[in-house]
Image (cartoon, rainbow, N blue to C red):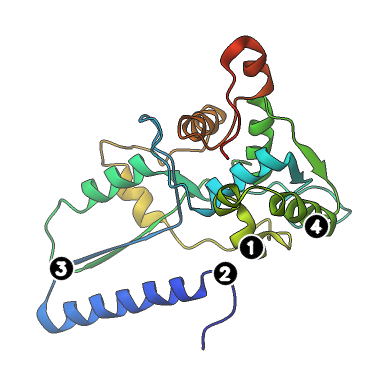
Amino acid sequence: MLSDGYAAGYGASKWADEALLHDAHKRFALPVNVYRGDMMLAHRRYKGQINVPDMFTRLLYSIILTGLAPDSFYEREPGGRKAIAHYDGLPVDFIAAAIVGSSSSPHRSIKTYNVLNHHVDDGVSLDTVVDWIESAGYAVERVRDQVEWVKRFETKLSTLSEQQRQHSSLVALGAWRQPHPAHPPQDDSSHFVAAVKELGCGPEVPHITEQFIHKYLGDMRSLGLIHEPTALRGAGGGRSAAA
């Protein structure tokens, strides 16, 4: 039975896909490569190459337009300390290159790759991403109480124009109503990491960086989704938020 969690049906469809591929391999000796990905983020080089409707872009968009973020997206450590968490996302150009490269060698088996950002100890989390939104020049108020943040966040998003609401996190707000586990179990990605070491896009799986997030925000500006940060508007580069 499916749960009522976010995107449960999507996950079930991926399971069904894999079951069909395993059956095809068993019956017809079809060679199979299975790639299990998580969040695919912007292209590191090409301008504007982002997935506008995905949860990550919606979240950045909504934080910037409301000027609100939680003090932390994650459950706190004992004693109330903010957790050092990790966000699992990878640039789409890296993922594409890794899939093409790792699938180019002929074989007769089933190979499964968990395409994950395995750097779970790098401390780059959604909280870090908010820090980088601020370092790009956008003002963000951090709200300590999660319930209060969700209430204020939802209220502000609800006052946006219809087009803006369509780009916002309103359609996926359930994913943010509760703090996320800081250290959720991660599937074993050692097979993928080993494959990347032999590829031209490697030898390492990349980290998310401040420069990358600033480029991501630039992509959003190029598509007219968000305004220039205050510092740039004051320097004569002004553009209002998309309406």
Q: Nearer the viewer, residue 81 or 147?
A: 147
Q: Residue 113, relative to residue 83: is it above or below?
A: below
Q: Residue 145, relative to residue 66: is it above or below?
A: below
Q: Residue 132, relative to residue 34: is it above or below?
A: above
Give the quadrant of residue 6: bottom right
Instruction: Please name which of the two marks, 3 or 4, marks the residue nearer to the observer.
Output: 4
| Kind of residue sitting beneath label 3 | Pro
Helix, strand or loop at mark 4:
helix
Give the quadrant of residue 242: top right
Disc 4/disc 1 C-alpha distance (Å): 14 Å
Disc 4/disc 2 C-alpha distance (Å): 19 Å
Name the side, left or right, on which 143 lies relative to 167: right
Q: Earlier in the sequence, mark 2 or mark 3?
A: 2
Question: Of the numbered discs in the image, which one, if any, rests on residue 31?
Answer: 3
Helix, strand or loop at mark 1:
helix
Query: Going 64% across and 32% down the picture, which residue do you hit?
Result: 132
Q: Nearer the viewer, residue 201 or 154?
A: 154
Helix, strand or loop at mark 2:
loop
Question: Of the numbered discs in the image, which one, if any, rests on residue 6?
Answer: 2
Disc 1/disc 2 C-alpha distance (Å): 6 Å
| Kind of residue sitting beneath label 4 | Lys
| Kind of residue sitting beneath label 2 | Tyr
Determine crowd level at label 1: few under 14, some 14-19, many 20+ residues with C-alpha closer than 10 A.
some
Helix, strand or loop at mark 3:
loop
Question: Of the numbered discs in the image, which one, if any, rests on residue 175?
Answer: 1
Q: Earlier in the sequence, mark 3 or mark 1?
A: 3
Name the residue carrying label 4: 151
Disc 2/disc 3 C-alpha distance (Å): 32 Å
Query: Going 73% across and 56% down the picture, which residue do you hit?
Result: 154
Q: Earlier in the sequence, mark 3 or mark 4?
A: 3
- The location of residue 95, given as percent across then percent down, is 34, 46
Q: Earlier in the sequence, mark 1 or mark 2?
A: 2
